[in-house]
């Protein structure tokens, strides 16, 4: 090495806002669970029976089953064959009602979605590492004479970053036992600038070796 020089460069770090639609999960009521069990296990043998018939056999009021069915249909746990709807009430025949894959999942987990809500979480993508970083990992200072790499030249696309975002967000939500993510919609929302220091070594042969001093 015959020459060594330190160069400071600001690297664009892409700020990404993710809108998360989620639902609170709760345990099903006795009637909701009974309806799910009914159509998951016995629908083939009940055929012509109506909700009213079943309620009479159990000596219960049919309105409880109808309201449970209404709630389950709102969350696509069950669906009606063409020509039938929840408006048919207790006159609905069992053969006109099908449990969906979501309904089977709800039954297996003994959990139903409740209220929906929307939240926004912010993430930061660093093009040098190709990874999401915490805001506290971004080194910024106020010196105005430092060159900046243009963000346009980094060739960062949302389609390339979205798999990282989805994986990180879903993993972080796994600890929220009563919440489940319905959808994630992300978009770029500006940049922060990460100050990197590069050391340039030039040896006797004129070879230039750039080395980053920052991890």
Image (tube, rainbow, N blue to C red):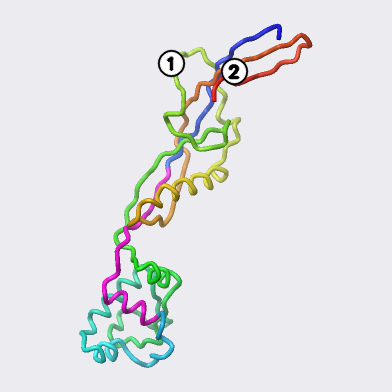
Q: Which mark is residue 198?
A: 2
Quarter where residue 148 is shown:
top right
Highlighted magenta segment, given as a residue range: 18-39
**Circle 1 SS class:** loop
Mark 2 Cα shell of 10 Å, populated few (<14), some (14-19), many (≥20): some
Asked whether, in this view, residue 79 is left or right of residue 7, the answer is: left
Distance in Å between CA atoms under marks 2 and 1: 18 Å
- Classify 211 as above or below 128: above
Name of the residue lying farthest toward the right: 205
Quarter where residue 84 is shown:
bottom left
Q: Quadrant of the N terminus?
A: top right
Counting every numbered tag in the picture gives: 2
Quarter where residue 136 is shown:
top left
- Residue 34 belongs to magenta span: yes
Q: Which mark is residue 5?
A: none
Identify the residue shown where x is 33% and y is 66%: 112
Residue closest to the eye, 76 or 54? 54
Mark 2 or mark 1: name the one nearer the start of the chain. Answer: 1
- Residue 204 pos. (x, y %): 76, 8
Q: Quadrant of the C terminus?
A: top right
- Residue 60 pos. (x, y %): 21, 85
* Residue under pointer 1: 142
- Classify 8 as above or below 181: above
Identify the residue shown where x is 24% and y is 84%: 62
Asked whether, in this view, residue 163 is left or right of residue 94, the answer is: right
- Classify 136 as above or below 87: above
- Residue 12 belongs to magenta span: no
- Classify 156 as above or below 143: below
- For the residues carrying marks 2 and 1, which lies nearer the camera in this image? 2
**Circle 2 SS class:** strand
- Residue 73 pos. (x, y %): 35, 73
Identify the residue shown where x is 29% and y is 66%: 27
């Amino acid at each position: 090495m015959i020459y060594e020089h330190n160069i400071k460069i600001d690297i664009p770090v892409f700020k990404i806002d993710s809108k998360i639609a989620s639902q609170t999960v709760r345990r099903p009521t006795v009637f909701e669970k009974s309806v799910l069990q009914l159509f998951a296990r016995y629908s083939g043998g009940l055929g012509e029976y109506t909700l009213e018939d079943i309620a009479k056999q159990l000596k219960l009021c049919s309105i409880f089953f109808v309201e449970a069915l209404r709630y389950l249909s709102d969350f696509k746990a069950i669906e009606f064959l063409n020509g039938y709807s929840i408006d048919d009430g207790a006159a609905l025949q069992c053969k006109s009602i099908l449990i969906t894959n979501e309904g089977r999942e709800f039954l297996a987990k003994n959990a139903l979605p409740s209220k929906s809500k929307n939240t926004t979480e912010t993430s930061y993508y660093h093009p040098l590492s190709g990874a999401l970083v915490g805001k506290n990992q971004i080194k910024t200072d106020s010196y105005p004479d430092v060159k900046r790499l243009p963000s346009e030249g980094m060739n960062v696309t949302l389609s390339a970053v979205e798999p990282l975002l989805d994986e990180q967000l879903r993993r972080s939500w796994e600890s929220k036992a009563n919440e489940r993510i319905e959808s994630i919609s992300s978009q770029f929302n500006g940049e922060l600038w990460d100050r990197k220091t590069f050391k340039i070594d030039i040896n006797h042969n004129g070879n230039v070796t750039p080395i980053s001093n920052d991890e």
